[in-house]
Image (cartoon, rainbow, N blue to C red):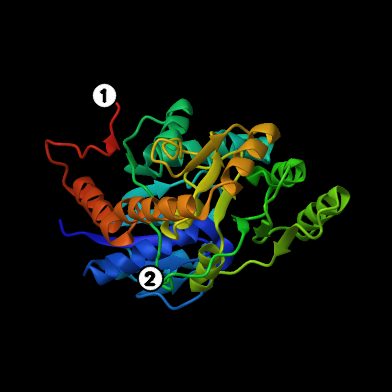
Amino acid sequence: MSTSVTTMVRDASHRGGGIVNVARPLHDVMTELGTNTHFVSGNQPETVAANQHVVGMGGAGLIDLPTNAIGSVVHIHGIWTAFEYRAFRTARERKARIVISPHGALEPWALRHKRIKKQIAWRLYQKSMMQRADLLIVNSLQERASLRQLGLTGPIATIANGVSIEGLSQYATPKERTVLFFSRLDPKKGVPDLIDAWARLGNRKGYTLHIQGHGEDAYVRSLAERIRQHGLGEHIRILPPVFGQNRWTAYQTASIFVLPSYSENFGITVAEALMAGLPVITTASTPWGDLPSEGLGWIVGNDIGQLTNALQTAIDLTEAQLTEVRGKAIAYAQARFRWDAIAEVYLKTYAFLLGPSTSTPPWIDVVRG
């Protein structure tokens, strides 16, 4: 059976965050590789996608999709909403193989948010959908373990996210003495811890902390108030979000990256920071535990004292030390997170799903009965 792939994602705008930043480039690269592809979304993408279909945020228009818009594989990105439920039903009715990527939505931290509502949805339909899917795809072994702990027994593929490098300058960019946080402004990202840790630093060596991203207005105001209470108005800047190619300016003019998150199934901004040559400070709650052994950064607990120490160590690095880390970080990221190589892994995964061989790819975990 030839492979034709339909990518389905509810929010294809920049508000779709990490989900659309995986779904859309994967679709684009598969199209470039000559795969028969279609892109189905709830709203209009930021830029036109090849063979796109907009069906409404609730997925009501899925029923009217032309026959050729549903490929031999339907890959649904995200869970919980009516869009994904209808996408699953449509794919099943049209006899496609179904792949679901939960994108961290089943991590313990995520499940605690709106806990009662999610428990009800899990029991009514969501667990059944996940169990009946032909394949689940996660982005880290940590996320795979979370799915197994929930009792999901189907095959699970672990495939890293890629980084779209369009707009990334290949030339040396003047660096500022800036520590950059670049992500969604959300309680799970640990930004209050970061502000408190910055207040504790003994000598900031002329560094400024940039907090850049989008979030609910009330939450952003609470962060600004925390900065004011610490008297750090001259030392911390909250900056508006930037998207697409424009984000690379933020990365490439910074010197150090920090993501003190309480939960990440992958953490695409860490991969982007490495691609831009930044040493990274992040937490043990993310799947980036190999950074210290690779000489690329620091792993801390969700602890303000540990975060303060890591920040101090990072800003104490000499320019020569930072330059050395930059080279290592870029080489590490180029070897692991280029979309052209990752798309090939996806295509091999879809092909296996359509015609399983006697040999299961090593990145696919199958529970043996």
Residue at 31% in and 66% down: 29
Instruction: Label 1: state its secondary structure.
Output: loop
Left or right, 259 with reference to 332:
right
Residue placed furthest toward the top: 369
| Element type where label 2 sits in the image | loop
Type of the residue with mark 2: Gln
Q: Depth-wise, is mark 1 or mark 2 nearer the camera?
A: 2
Q: Amino acid at mark 1?
A: Arg
Q: Is residue 89 in view? A: no
Q: Is residue 192 left or right of residue 284?
A: right
Tags 1 and 2 touching, CB below 8 Å = no
Vertically, is 336 above or below 292? below
Q: Residue at x 37, y 29 (%)?
A: 153
Work out whether 156 lies above or below 161.
above
* Residue reaching furthest to the bottom: 48
Q: Nearer the viewer, residue 228 or 90?
A: 228
Q: To which residue does mark 2 refer?
A: 170
In percent of width and height, residue 302 lies at 64, 34
Is residue 49 placed above or below 79 in the rendered structure?
below
Dot 2: few (<14), some (14–19), or many (≥20) neighbours within 10 Å?
few
- Quarter of the image where the N terminus is located: bottom left
Quarter in which the C terminus is drawn: top left
Q: Which residue matches tag 1? A: 368
Q: First in sequence, mark 1 or 2: give its number.
A: 2
Residue 68: where, in percent of width, then height? 29, 69
Q: Position of residue 190 (x, y in %)?
A: 67, 43
How many numbered discs sit on the rendered protein?
2
* Residue shown at 21% from the left, 51% from the top: 348
